[in-house]
Amino acid sequence: MFTFAKAWVEERGVSLRAVTSSIRPPPPSSIPPSRSGASVALEDVSLSVTTEAGAVEILREATLSVAAGEFVCLLGPSGSGKSTILNLIAGLSRPTSGRVRYGDGGVTRPGPDRAVVFQDAALFPWLTLRANIEFPLKLQHWPADARRARSEELLRLVHLWRFQERFPHELSGGMRQRGAIARALATDPAVLLMDEPFAALDSQTREILQGEVERIWSATRKTVIFVTHNVREAVRLGDRIVLMGTRPGRVLHEEFVDLPRPRSSNDARVATLATGIARRIASEVEKVAREEADDAWVAPGDHRPGDPRRQLGRGI
C-alpha cells in the first residue's frame, strides 16, 4: 500500500518528503488534543476515464455535502461510484469536472488529515502491530517517545494493547481490521474514509466491529464516510445514507436515520428502515445483475421459464 502511494505521489511530480515535511508534530510534551472532524463536499463532480473501448463515465454530476463530525454511509451496487468518491476526497483521484472541497479549501492531493481504511487491512506483514501503527508517524518525523505514546493510546482505543508485539499473521481478521483502523487514526485525521472494511469478515465479527466503529466515532467525533453494499450495516451505522445509482455513478437519494444510538442490526426499527431502503435501490441492483449475468439470468420473483439450462439438476 505504501509503495502504491509513493508511486502515485511521485508520478505527479511531488516527493513524499514535500507531502510529509509540512506537517511536523510538536515535541511529545505538547502534543495537541485530537483534531475534530471537518466538512467535505462534492460540487457537480464528474469523472471519466479513457480505455481502449473509448471513454467510460464513472461518476456523473455528483453533489454531496458531509458536515463536520457526521457519519455518512454510501450505499449502492457495484459500479455506482462509491469508492471513486472516497478516492476523490482522499486526493487519490481528480475529477474531470466539478470541485471537491475539504473545509474551506479544495482537495488537490493526499494528506494526513484524510485517512483511508480498505477492505483488506493492508498491514505490513514484516512489522508488528505497534510498528504498523507508528509507521505513518515515522514518515512525519515524530520523535520516538511521541510515537510510542500515540500508538499506546490507539491500541488501547481498539482493545489491542495486549497484542502490540504480534505480527499481522498472528492476528484474526477482525483484529487486523481494528489494527488498520488504529493506523488510520495515527495521524489524527479529521476525515476517516472507510471502503467496505468489514466485507470479508464473518457476520459475528462484522457485528462486533460495527459496534467498535460506532464507539470510536462517538469518542473522537471524526467525520466518517463509510462505503458498504449492506443495507442493514448502513442503517446500523449512519446518521445519513446516500443511495447511489450506477452506470454512470450518481447520487439518487438521501435517507436520514433518526434512530437512537447505540443500534443493533437485529433491532426491528433498523430492519424496517433497511427493508424500505432496499426496495428503493432494488432497480439499480437488478440493472447491474442484468448487465453482468448471462442470458439465463432471471430477476428474483420472475417466474418466467427463461433459459432451460436453469432447470438442470432441479429435483436432485
Image (cartoon, grey):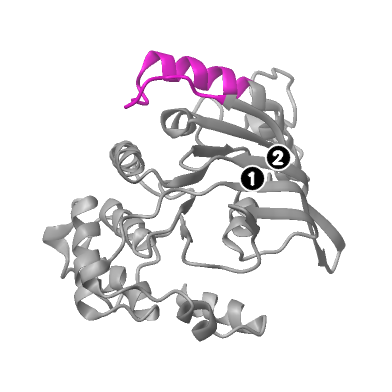
Q: Residue at x 42, y 47 (%)?
A: 222
Q: Residue at x 22, y 60 (%)?
A: 171
Q: Residue 259 placed where, x, y %?
A: 42, 19
Residue type at the position of mark 1: Ser
Residue 215 among those drawn in magenta: no
Q: Residue 44 placed where, x, y %?
A: 78, 46
Q: Is residue 62 visible?
A: yes
Q: Nearer the viewer, residue 312 or 207?
A: 207
Q: Residue 94 placed where, x, y %?
A: 71, 63
Q: Residue at x 27, y 76 (%)?
A: 127
Q: Nearer the viewer, residue 117 or 188?
A: 188
Q: CA distance from mark 1 to mark 2?
A: 7 Å
Question: Are circles 1 and 2 on residues that touch, CB within 8 Å?
Answer: yes
From the image, tell me which residue sits under label 1. 78
Q: Residue at x 44, y 74 (%)?
A: 23
Q: Nearer the viewer, mark 1 or mark 2?
A: 1
Residue type at the position of mark 2: Val
Residue 63 sits above or below residue 272 on the image: below
Residue 89: image tag: none
Residue 288: image tag: 2
Question: Which residue of the protein is positioned furthest toward the right in this rendering?
Answer: 54
The residue range painted magenta reads: 256-279
Q: Nearer the viewer, residue 191 or 285?
A: 191
Secondary structure beneath label 1: loop
Label 1 neighbour load within 10 Å: few <14, some 14-19, many 20+: some
Which picture quadrant has residue 305? Answer: top right
Q: Mark 1 or mark 2: name the one nearer the start of the chain.
A: 1
Q: Residue 217 placed where, x, y %?
A: 36, 42
Q: Is residue 129 visible?
A: no
Label 2 neighbour load within 10 Å: few <14, some 14-19, many 20+: some
